[in-house]
Amino acid sequence: MPAPFHLQLTADFFGADGRTKYDDIGLAVLAAAPHIRPVPFPRHEPEIAPDQLATANGVIVLTPKVTAQSLAQAPDLLAVGRFGVGYDSVDVPACTAADVAVFITAGAVDRSVAEATVGWMIALAHRVRAKDQLVRTGGWDQRSQYMGSELRDRTLGLIGLGGIARTVLQLLAPWGMRPALAYDPYLDAAAAAQAGARLVSLEELLRSSDFVSIHCPLTEQTRGLLGAPQLAQMRPTAYLLNTARGGIVDEAALYAALQAGRLAGAALDCFAQEPVRTPPPLAALENVLFAPHCIAWTHELFRDIGRAACQGMVDLSLGRQPRGVVNPAVFAKPSFQEKWRRVCRF
C-alpha cells in the first residue's frame, strides 16, 4: 500500500457550502488511489499563505499565486499542480529552489480553447455583436452597413504553435482558409510544416495575416510582445485575438489602433491586470469582444483539466514523474529525490 499522500486544493474550487462550484473537477481519478486524501483549503487567499501548505504533499491551484513566501513552511511539499496550462502565477525558480515540482495540465485545454478561438474568429468576421445590437436597439434598417466576411480565403497567423494552436488548425481545416502562418522561436520550419503552418518572422506574420491569434505563455520574452509598433504592422482589416495571457498585448496601444480604425477588431479573454472590476477603455468600442478569462470554460474543460491534475498527483505519489512538468531539473536534485522517497516511501 502506498504511503498516505496529503493533497490540498485551493479554496476557490469550492462554494460556501463546501461543495465544488463546478460539475466535475476530475476528483474521480482519486477513487483508484485511496492513499490520496484531497482536502480543500479552509479559506481563499489571492496568494497562498505559508500555513496553508504546512502539511501538504501536493497542491492543485486554480487562481492563487504561489510565491517563495508561500513555500516557507512546506517541508513535505512535492508538487504544485496548476489547474490549466499557464503558470505565470507560480514562482517556478522559487519552487525549484525549495525542491517542489511544478506541472501543468498539458493537452487538457487544447480542444476547448481552440473551439473558443474559432468561435471568436467567426463572431468577429461576421460582426455578430454589432448585428445583435441592431435588433436590441431597433436598428434593423441599418443592417446593410454591417457587412461581414467569411473565413474562406483568409490567412490565420498564430503566435505560438503548441497544442492549442495545432488544434485550431485542425478545426479550421474544412473552412477553406489560406495556409496558416506561425511565429514560434522554439520550433523549426519542419515541425511547423508538420503542424500545418509556415514558420515566419513576427513581422511577416503581422503584415500578412487577417487574423492574429495569440497562443504563447506570458514570459519575460513575451511580455509586451505586441505594442504600438507591432500593431501598426497589422492590416487595417485584420483582427487580433488573445486567449493566452494579459500583458502580451499593450492594451493602451490596442485601444488607440482600434479607435483610429487601424484594426478591424479584437477579442480579449485576458488582461494585464485581473480581475477587471470596472469597464476598461476598450469596452467603449463596438468591435471588441470580451470574456473574464473564461471564454474556454466548459464542463468538459474542467473535467479534463481536473483529471490531468489529479493523475499527475497520483503519478507523483507512486514514484513516477508527472506529465507537463515545467521545471524538470528539480527531479535531478538529490535533495528533491530524498524528499520524494521519504514522503512517498517507494
Image (cartoon, helix red, strand yellow):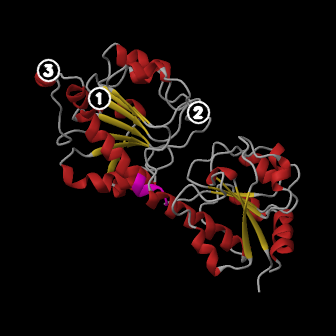
| Residue linked to disc 3 | 142
- Whether residue 170 is visible to the viewer of this picture, yes or no, is yes
**Which quadrant of the structure image shows residue 220?**
top right
Q: Which residues are magenta?
A: 108-112
**Mark 2 or mark 3: which comes first in sequence?**
3
Label drawn at residue 182: none
State the image quarter where residue 231 is shown.
Answer: top left
- Residue 59: x and y in percent read 72, 59
Q: From the image, tell me which residue sits under label 1.
A: 238
In what element is the residue under mark 1? loop
Q: Which structural element holds mark 2?
A: loop
Q: Where is residue 234 shown, x and y percent of the image?
A: 34, 25
Magenta segment: does it hold 111? yes
Residue 173: say if magenta. no
Figure quadrant of the C terminus:
bottom right
Residue type of the residue flagged with mark 3: Gln
